Image: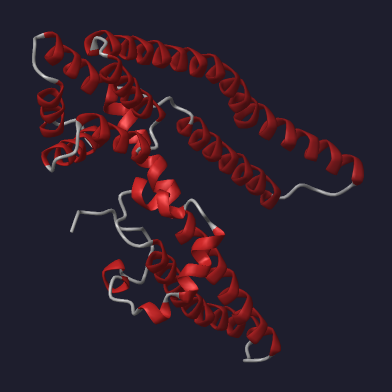
Amino acid sequence: MEKQNVPVMMLFPLEKAQSFSDKYLFLGKFLSKLIFSLKYDLQKAEIYIDVERYCLASFLSALLYGIMFLFVGMAFGTIISRQLGVFTITLMIVFSLASFLTMLIFHLFYPKLAAYQLASMVDQELLFAMRTMLIQLSSGISLFEAMRLISKSNYGQVSTEFNLVVKDINSGTSETEALEKLAFRTKSEVLKKTAWQLITTMRSGGSIVNALNSQVEALVAQQVDAIKAYSAELNLWTLIYLIIAAAMPSLGITFLVIASSVGGSGIGPESVMLILVLSLSVQVAMIILVKSKVPKVVK
């Protein structure tokens, strides 16, 4: 069996899901119909399991979370009301249902998120891999040997993708069909476009070196544009950060002091601490937001 990614936070192991009896899969089949792309997302996320079994495992995992948070709700309700009354039971049900639905939705959409994460990892290493392949092809090495070299090199997820291509070719699949499978499998738009460009060139009898060279130049230009766009956007975020980090706390405290003197009430240390905590929270959120917008380019 192929090595696969393990979904995070799933309490029910996928290995046990493989042994589910078919008569219990009706629920998995129902859930799989709600997200029609889940079957393909599992393949792109390298989670090799039938979609019905994955959905049933997701349901059972979410059910375990619901049972766990049933006791969490009971603990909170008992602490607040000091008794196991209507309020505690209501809190238990709310905690349980909320955690069950949240984790079920998370498990069902996790393959899509994982596939996009793998695509991001591909984009970070793809330029170096394409340059290496271009050098190999320019020196007279065949496309298969160039792809085999990439699969054995240290290019992260790109090497993993090309390793699958090489395995398909070694098993009797033609190079164009193996690249087609790669194009359909990956969520990286750059790798998908590169694969289709190679397929079209091979079928038309054109120069693979010229086609790959144009893709390398296009990828370099794309990354340069992404860096320029991020640099321009960063100026705006820097201004907003300075306003929130420096101007708003001082102005807010000044306004409260003036308002309290006019109204006759005082401003206590609790109000100052609340403003500082809110300001710090917004600053941390902005730092995380700006960091998430960093373009995925080679280092």
Q: Position of residue 217 (x, y in %)?
A: 33, 9
Name the residue nearer the viewer: 142 or 245.
142
**Residue 267 left/right relative to 74:** right
User: Eyeballing the image, is 6 above or below 122?
Assistant: below
Residue at (56%, 41%) from the top-left corner? Answer: 280
Name the residue nearer the viewer: 86 or 15.
15
For residue 130, what is the image quadrant? top left
Q: Position of residue 107 (x, y in %)?
A: 45, 61
Q: How many marks?
A: 0
Q: Position of residue 227 (x, y in %)?
A: 44, 16
Name the residue nearer the viewer: 206 or 52.
206
Q: Residue furthest right?
A: 263
**Residue 101 left/right relative to 264:** left
Residue at (60%, 81%) from the top-left corner? Answer: 92
Q: Residue furthest front?
A: 204
Where the C terminus falls, by quadrant?
top left
Q: Position of residue 162 (x, y in %)?
A: 20, 34
For residue 94, what is the image quadrant? bottom right
Q: Residue furthest bottom?
A: 84
For residue 247, what is the image quadrant? top right
**Residue 88 left/right relative to 66:** right
| Residue 48 visible (yes or no) | yes
| Residue 62 visible (yes or no) | no
Residue at (63%, 88%) from the top-left corner? Answer: 82
Where the N terminus falls, by quadrant?
bottom left
User: Eyeballing the image, is 253 above or below 295?
Assistant: below
